Image (tube, helix red, strand yellow):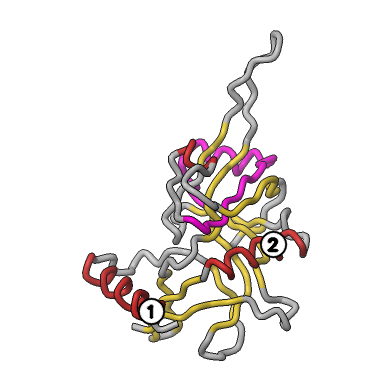
Amino acid sequence: MEIIELFIDETDEVSGIEAISVVENPAIESDFVALKNQEYKLAEVDKEKRILMGAALIPNKPIYRQSGEQEYYIYFSQATVRKASELFFINGNQNNSTLEHELELKGLTAVESWIVESEQDKSRMYDLNVPIGTWMVSMKVNNDDVWKKVKAGEVKGFSIEGYFADKLERPNEPVKQSVDKSVDDSEQKAQEVINELKELFSNE
């Protein structure tokens, strides 16, 4: 099965990430953390911050894709992950969000963004043991309906939406990191993907 690297074409004005979606099954298999305010101020009742922290994009992680009858995997290099995170804010997309890649949402804003640089990263405080080079995001949720879904466990992670080019020089296509529940997640297939990635990287 083909493994295709996606990258940002800086000559294409639409290339990059347009929105972050909150989803039940993130393809990156990394759930966000719903953070609550643990401080009490005077006689005020403890109020929720309504902040979600999670991985938006993980480098070198094979993501299953299907186009018609063609099945393949895509991945993003560390350099592309960093560039995507920068352009997301440069292009002013921090207020763009959707629910399950379908419903456009209001009231969600990316308020913090960083790349995991070491094992001492703050994400470790919340048991988010993502790889070095991962793009982490914290989002403020001022949307009651979405927050109800968070508390009910109906949404569990972030998923990106955007346009990328690939090394097969095909036209840019929108990429939505979502999970196809029909994917065979057997250990054998996973090992085949890992082996192909190792071979790919060793030839660069």
- Element class at badge 2: helix
Q: Residue at x 60, y 44 (%)?
A: 146
Residue placed most toward the observer, 62 or 100: 62
Q: Residue at x 45, y 59 (%)?
A: 28
Residue 19 left/right relative to 31: right
Please name the residue that numbered disc 2 is placed on: 86
Q: Residue at x 52, y 59 (%)?
A: 133
Question: From the image, which quarter does the C terminus lie in?
Answer: bottom left
Residue placed most toward the observer, 111 or 204: 204
Mark drawn on residue 173: none
Residue 147 point in image, percent of width and height: 59, 39
Is 154 covered by the magenta stretch? yes
Query: What's the magenta region?
Result: 132-157
Is 5 covered by the magenta stretch? no
Q: Residue at x 40, y 72 (%)?
A: 64
Please name the residue that numbered disc 1 is placed on: 202
Residue 189 point in image, percent of width and height: 26, 72
